[in-house]
């Protein structure tokens, strides 16, 4: 199991100092002081090898981690992140139950709200729990004998990991929801099926092409990232699933459009009777636009919150300007901030960004199947 929570107390103290200074510098902890709080932290580190964030520190840290996430275009609303403090939860079944509650509450029947649920942290000799699914809701990828994949090729490894631990698979469709794959130090890996009420999905149709509904496409509505570690002041929370809402291109251009995912562009192009004899006919571009039109149309018709890449690009630049006015840099990875559709038609394309590694932050880690 990754991460045993054996950080050097002196190193953790330095990281804690940076975080506590930030916490108080930004107007938190009224009536207290950074010096007094650091004295408490040093005493706790000396006796236990770690320390415990207050509820206010956890909330601030989780929100600033979103603010510092250089790959996320949707950070304008970082202050509104709802923080569910479940640090006392380390049992796999309880984590699964709280993950279901997260999905239902964050989904809001379509009124999606940015939410994070924070479970027990790593501690010296006692690693915290881990959710190995990249997102709480992901579709299985079943590798066939001929090498093809039914479902989402991205999820072949996590699907095989679940099968090795007893999952018998779903109905064998392209959109079978994977069970949660949760690992704890006490019990190892356990699997938990998500109940239907936790999986809000949208069936995809097109405003002008009746045949589109016959493609049988769908996507889930709440993108809860669950295989990243939340790091705040030297303390790592390996199970801290969090969500915003989808930008349409994440589904239409990447999940459904990428050649190593659902690869739907050739199918859509054929239905549109496009000339696919040459790349120069731009058939991929035309099919890609209509696939994204279908996603935005379907979510809007279903009353599920989503945003388009032009609107979100403008919001992101508003965020960048607000951060500048606050005297902060806004770390951003250009290759992730620029949308995968009509990039140069958005304002975020025509500028450079600072790509600093700031903390608190959400840190990527590998699936155990890799």
Image: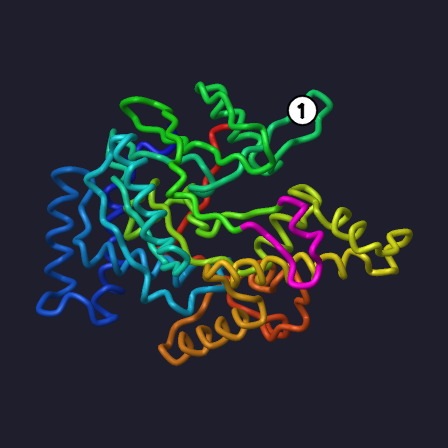
Q: Is residue 204 magenta?
A: yes
What range of the chain is rendered magenta?
Answer: 203-216
Q: Which residue corresponds to the image point at 74% horizontal and 51% vertical from the top-left? A: 268
Left or right: residue 369 compared with residue 43: right
Left or right: residue 266 compared with residue 303: right
Residue 299 percent coordinates (x, y): 52, 59
Display colour scheme? rainbow
Residue 156 percent coordinates (x, y): 58, 31
Instruction: Return the residue at label 1.
Output: 144
Q: Which residue corresponds to the image point at 62% horizontal and 51% vertical from the top-left? A: 254
Residue 29 percent coordinates (x, y): 15, 65
Q: Identify whether 92 is placed above or below 60.
A: above
Q: Which residue corresponds to the image point at 26% horizontal and 60% vertical from the top-left? A: 60
Camera-side residue of 268 and 222? 268
Q: Residue furthest bottom?
A: 325
Q: Identify whether 184 is placed above or below 112.
A: above
Q: Residue furthest right?
A: 277
Left or right: residue 332 compared with residue 123: right
């Amino acid at each position: 199991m990754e991460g045993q929570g054996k950080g050097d107390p002196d190193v953790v103290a330095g990281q804690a100092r940076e975080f506590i200074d930030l916490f108080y510098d930004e107007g938190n902890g009224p009536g207290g002081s950074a010096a007094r709080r650091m004295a408490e932290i040093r005493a706790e580190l000396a006796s236990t090898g770690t320390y415990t964030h207050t509820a206010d520190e956890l909330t601030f840290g989780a929100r600033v981690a979103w603010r510092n996430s250089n790959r996320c275009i949707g950070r304008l609303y970082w202050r509104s992140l709802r923080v569910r403090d479940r640090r006392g939860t380390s049992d796999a079944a309880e984590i699964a139950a709280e993950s279901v509650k997260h999905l239902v509450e964050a989904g809001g029947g379509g009124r999606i709200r940015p939410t994070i649920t924070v479970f027990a942290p790593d501690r010296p000799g006692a690693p915290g729990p881990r959710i190995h699914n990249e997102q709480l809701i992901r579709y299985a990828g079943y590798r066939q004998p001929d090498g093809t994949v039914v479902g989402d090729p991205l999820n072949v490894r996590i699907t095989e990991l679940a099968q090795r631990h007893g999952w018998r698979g779903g109905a064998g469709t392209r959109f079978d929801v994977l069970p949660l794959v949760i690992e704890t130090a006490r019990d190892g890996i356990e699997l938990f099926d998500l109940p239907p009420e936790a999986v809000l999905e949208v069936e995809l149709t097109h405003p002008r092409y009746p045949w589109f509904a016959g493609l049988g496409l769908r996507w889930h509505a709440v993108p809860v990232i669950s295989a990243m570690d939340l790091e705040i002041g030297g303390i790592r929370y390996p199970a801290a699933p969090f969500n915003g809402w989808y930008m349409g291109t994440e589904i239409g251009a990447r999940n459904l459009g990428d050649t190593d995912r659902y690869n739907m562009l050739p199918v859509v192009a054929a239905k549109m009777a496009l000339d696919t004899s040459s790349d120069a006919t731009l058939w991929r571009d035309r099919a890609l636009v209509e696939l994204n039109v279908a996603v935005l149309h379907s979510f809007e018709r279903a009353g599920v919150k989503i945003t388009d890449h032009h609107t979100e690009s403008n919001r992101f630049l508003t965020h960048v300007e607000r951060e500048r006015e606050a005297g902060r840099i806004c770390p951003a990875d250009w290759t992730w901030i620029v949308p995968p559709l009509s990039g140069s038609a958005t304002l975020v394309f025509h500028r450079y960004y600072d790509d600093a590694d700031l903390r608190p932050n959400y840190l990527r880690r590998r699936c155990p199947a890799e």
